[in-house]
Amino acid sequence: MPFKKQKQHQQKHSGPKAEKKKLKKQNGSTEEDERKRNPKAFAVQSAVRMAKTFHRAQDIKTKKHHVPVVDRTPLEPPPIVIVVVGPPKVGKSTLIRCLIKNFTRQKLTDICGPVTIVSGKKRRLTFMECNNDINSMIDLAKVADLVLMLIDASFGFEMETFEFLNICQVHGFPRIMGVLTHLDAFKNNKTLRKTKKNLKHRFWTEVYQGAKLFYLSGMVYGEYQNQEVKNLGRFISVMKFRPLVWQTSHPYILADRIEDLTDPERLRTDPKCDRTVSLYGYLRGTHLKNKGQVHIPGVGDFQMSDVNFLPDPCPLPGTQKKRALNEKERLLYAPMAGVGGVVYDKDAVYIDLPANHVKQLQEVRPTTELVQSLIETHVTLDAKMAASKVSLFSGSAGLDPTDIMQEGLREIHVWDAHTQTQRRKVVFTGLEEEEDDVSGSSSDEDDDGSDQENQEEEDDLSTFLKEVRDKSEKATKGSTPPVKKRKLEEMQGEEEVIAEAPAFADSEDELERGEADSEGEGEAERAGDSGHCSKESEEDSDDEEDGDEDDESMEEEIGADDSDEEEEQGKYHSGLFTFSLCSILWTFKWKEGLQQKASAAFLRHQEAAPNLRKLVYGSVVEAEDSEEEEEELGGLFRVNRPQKSKKVQADALDCSHFNPDISHNWELEEMLNSIRDCFVTGQWEEGQDAATLLKEDEELYGDFEDLETGKVHKGTTGEQDQAEVRDSEYSVKMDDEEVQKNKRLEKKRRLKERFDTEYDDGDATYFDDLKEEMQKQAELNRAEFEDMDDESRVQYEGFRPGMYVRLEISSLPCEFVTNFDPHYPVIIGGLGTSEGNVGYLQMRLKKHRWYERILKTRDPLILSLGWRRFQTIPLYHIEDHNGRHRLLKYTPQHMHCGASIWGPITPQGTGFLAVQSVSGVKANFRIAATGVVLDLDKSVTIVKKLKLIGYPYKIFQNTCFIKGMFNTVLEVAKFEGASIRTVSGVRGQIKKALSTPPGAFRATFEDRLLMSDIVFLRSWYPVSIPQLYNPVTSLLLPVGQKDSWSGMRTVGQLKHDLGVRNKPSIDSLYKPITRAPRHFNPLHIPKELQKALPFKSKPKLLQPKGKVPRDLKRASVIREPHERKVAELLRALSTVHHYKKKVAQRAHHAKHKEFLQQKEKDEEAKMKRMKDARKKLYRIMGQKDQKKQRSSLKGTPQDD
Amino acid sequence: MASHGLTYEGCNFLRQRLVLSALSGKRVKIKNIRSKDDEPGLRDFEANFIRLLDKLTNGSTIEINQTGTVLVYQPGLLYGGTVEHDCNPQRSIGYYLEALLMLGPFMKSPLKATLRGVTNDLTDPTVDLLKSTALPVMKKFGIDGEGFDIKVRTSWYSVFVEMQSNPGMDKVAMHVILYLNLSLVLHPQVVKRGMAPGGGGEVVFTCPVRKTVRPVQLTDPGKIKRIRGVAYSVRVSPQMGNRIVESARGILNQFLPDIYIYTDHMKGANSGKSPGFGLTLVAETLNGYFLSAEMLSTPQGQGDPILPEDLGRNCAKLLLEEIYRGGCVDSSNQSLALLLMTLGQQDVSKVLLGPLSPYTIEFLRHIRDFFQIMFKIEVQKPLEDERKGGDKVLMTCVGVGYSNISKTLK
């Protein structure tokens, strides 16, 4: 049937209906109207359902919330780490190159190590390429902010991609952006589209629905298309990041520069000695404390010997009002890559930048003079650093910068040729030690060195000047005359002070870290700040002890001395580089007028409150001052320990009570008056006084209009107040104006507050409150140390993220330096408190569903947990219903299980992943398991099942003697009352030990045992965790073999490698089963029984049939040939006959069938005919009847 | 991966060092403990303290040399749970309790410590003082909730008497209080008071567990609205308490009318082994901060006996002294507050203190050693015409972001 088109609905365009509709459309009926018009439809049908929908709505709403966290991002954030990952030959380097070119207009040919660029006014980026080594992948996933995941579209996903995604998932999920490359390999547009779609959807399931996937279609001259790269760059520069837990709670650095500072002499004598290395990089994450512990993945745990911050090598442009960056602000910093930064050589470092770029830099900003100066001279970095330092000073001091620069550089050249030790001794502690060695005094000479220092201290200033002169002479001549030993020593003293104590004579909050207090300070172990014990302070304290109080002028001189030293310190530290000779030149210039400055500073000191900070964290001159002043101050600063009685102090009473020696006389009225205002009965502050508050309320709410009567009430008090104010205004007009203004502001503020509470905060939820609280805290965090200079700020809050810092680590293995490969990331991860310890960890673990095998207990496994990668021996266990941790031999296939390891203490909730080996590339998925740390309990409660077997040797009724289960009576005694069981399931209990044989016992059972029964006792045996913690030291391996680290092998691997095969026990071998045929005896039924049985069940004892006698057998007939012929013929005839008969029968049958059909037909026809006849008959009869009836109704017919 | 330990000399500040060691996980070595003394080595009470620490932790190792002059402590995991400990009567329970207050919130399971010994003595803060001042300080840091308490037996009867003697109290309030008390009496915590030197007191300290401590800004102490106190007496005439109260009120009434000093007289088994009496005064400010002072009678047979009147007066003066010093935390709890600030989130915490006590100063140094945290210390001088006592110190620090690594994640 053909489809018939329905008639379409005709919309009315005119008429009343159309009018009505139009009107409706115009007004736009709201839900409100609907409700009004049809209230029943909107009535609550079911309260339960309504509650349900409401709950659901709320659930969805709250699900959208993230737990609010305090925003701790610094004002100037560190560069964003962009890790470019992907399988080899996918185009990682090309992409980085293109992006760098896009952002900085520079070409970087060789990408190795992190590359930092300025991408915008507020954003810097650090690119890092991740090679195909799983070690690098793990390390970089931990520090990445954004991952550019390159996928070869012509090939599809590779295992590396999925591995990296899984690594990311475990260590906090950084932002991931997919980039499809090699799209030009597709010739067919349709397959291209299909592939894109498939890849996209697979990518989405892995990352999240709607994750950004970029397409880089084709290459133009070996680069990606400009427009596409530009778009990608735009995406990157507007991307937002959510803080990751691990990253925000730990400081970390992706090192972009590394320097070996080891003494060359030591290197010469022992090339394998531990190296002192300085690592440079942007600090990320959170605040870094000096002297803390760090972990370098691939190397190990180390204590930082020193940290300081440097001027930013790649600073953000200043706040200028323009949209784009200009050329000179597009900085590039990649020391390891060799272009645009610093090039590495064995012991020298070179710079390579286009000349015009350098010029621009020089003109614009002093901070990059560092780079510039480095470029101009081809000398070692240290020297260059020193030079750059000078230029930094020049800006502030007004000296001719170029002048100094030239001189400085020249000097450095000269200087460098000579002793290296001298060059570095001032700033770096490591070198200080060296010098100590040179001068033959150890670092802990503080105790005995005091006398000597006393002497030194007297002619402090003069010596210093002498030194300076010496040095300057040296500098001008360009040669190094041998310095006398004593002088050298003195100089060291000076310089150590300079190095260690950064201080500012002007600031009250001086940062002198000298510590005179602690007797334990000499010990190297004592942790604390770098300059625990400055010599200066020691001197001063000695001075105090000796009690030779100088007269006023003398004191002043000392003060001057101190302050000038302090100023120097300030200078040096703001530079934080080496103590170069040019700075000595400097000293002359600023020394003019020093005396005045110093004396002024000293006076200020005298006047100012004693510095509590110094008192607590290290006492200097001011400690004594405070002690002098404390009488006046009422015991506030009494706390300085008496230096002489150290030993007494050390063993004093440990008590937290604070009972001052001189208490105030609380009998006196004035004393009582001094605390009057501490009580509610005292006088209140201006803003809080009840009277004022009331008055204000009156002002606010005093005047109102009575609407009914139309009367207007005025706040009278306010009026009066104003009047009063007016009166007073005439008298003290000028002074009052300020006060009035303040008052008004205050009033305004309060009004606003009240308004806010009334209108805004009405529907504030818990979440909003929490968010607001966090916001406040974040503001406070920012504001608290904002106006401090970095030097002192670092003291309080540590080095803050975003700073460019230099770490010094004193004992790195030499392989780290000799086998250094910039393609591998060097990450310095800070460790929290107690994260440096090793202990037991309980974790929840699940075998990865893509990993093909299950994991075996006690097989060594490499874990990536926290910053670390290490090999350990896990024990897998599962918790039974009664809380017992039962040891498992293997991890379950698809289920979580517990795992206990011996490893580094890491906070609970930290995720980890496990791999079997980190060496080489395998076809299969390498991540064996993932999980999370649950607990750090030191007591392990894993048990394994132990079945003890015994055999009964004497059986009474239900009691039984059992042997073979234990060896001594004592063992039995321990298990008295324990329940035992036989194999057949008979339960029993151990009763008491028997004396002989040893270890036998009496037991009772619920039933009688058989001698063949075996009795067993189920017990649990605690398992101890093997203490293996083996950090993966992949970075120490030679270049090119860094991905071949192998640790402890599993038993299986060992056997395989050594070709050891276990001889299986003979009993366990399979043999062909041979079964003896069974023989059954005949059933014997007794005769009596047989008789009694019914016939049916009676055995039928039939006689065997006998032989048929011969005469009864019929003889066989052998036909004559004629007869045979006849018979043959007969048979043939009969066959023919049979056949004929058959055919005839078939024909007859068919004929009969036809006949029957015919008959049926006839019958049918006959029936029809009869039916018709009957019909006819009935019709006639009916007509007759009708006629009859009609006639009867008519009456008697006439003719009847 | 050797954890780098710290080394100290002398037995002073032993508790601080061990507590900080337990919290930071750093090994600590203390040398030359009374090495020049006639009786070298650790005293009994110190050994007892170490034993208590051992009970609280799991997997810690303690090595003491033959003479007891060198102690090496490798901290383990803070375990908590139910602990019973007999404290050495040389020092009062306060000595032990101060350390427990610092460790309590960072245990694996909530702490319930029953300490037996001297509840009140002269050298250490008494249990009453800690209960009324240390707990509110900790509450400010978010350590609060069910079962955060120090229980010494307080006699509700004496409260009742005090209230009756005060006609200003209205009947309804009294009934309400009585009702509440009765409900408390239904679950009596039989804990006993014991004076030095005999001891025999008992204290139950319960503390919930926290994963993190929140940062605080305690900068405005507010004005003192009321003063409360307990005058306790054991094995002496019950009249002593009343005499103390009388004299103390005499001084404090000049400032404030809202003063209640409860008398707490213990009898029989609850009264410990030695006679004595004392007074603890606590001033509460509008913002919920507590300043306290206390005074005790000299222990039996040691020194001159002291009159209860003198004791009351002196104690009141001590309270005035404490108020003069001011701040949001009283002098004996400074170190506790500073510790909790240090262990807070990586946010700025501020607290206003009175002058720093020597104990606190050493504690600050120790904090720097163990956690590398330095406090910004600013002196706030009182204004010209302000009558609010002496100089205050504003302590500011950024917390280390400490999280309780003992607590199990489920």
Image: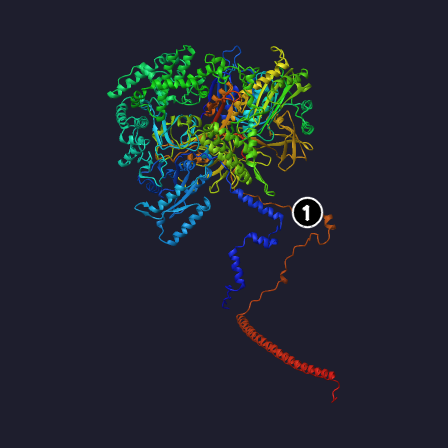
Q: How far from the left and from the top, in percent, is residue A382?
A: 31, 27
Residue nearest the viewer, comparing A897 with A1120:
A897
- Quarter occupied by the N terminus of chain B: top left
Specify whether residue A163 is in view.
Answer: no
- Quarter occupied by the C terminus of chain B: top right
Secondary structure, mark 1, is: loop
* Coloration mode: rainbow
Residue furthest toward the left? Answer: A477
| Residue at the spot of label 1 | A1084
Q: State left or right for residue A1046 relative to residue A392.
A: right
Residue A366 in the image: above or below residue B203 = below
Q: How many marks?
A: 1
Residue nearest the viewer, comparing A1117 with A74:
A74
Residue nearest the viewer, comparing A52 with B395:
B395
Q: State left or right for residue A342 relative to residue A768.
A: left
Q: State left or right for residue A356 relative to residue A42.
A: left
Q: How far from the left and from the top, in percent, is residue A900?
A: 51, 33
Q: How far from the left and from the top, in percent, is residue B329?
A: 54, 24
Q: How far from the left and from the top, in percent, is residue A258?
A: 35, 30
Residue type for callout 1: His
Specify whether residue A587 is in view.
Answer: yes
Q: State left or right for residue B291 relative to residue A407.
A: right
Q: Residues within 10 Å of mark 1 (few under 14, many from 20)?
A: few
Residue nearest the viewer, comparing B390 with B208:
B390
Chain containing the residue with disc 1: A
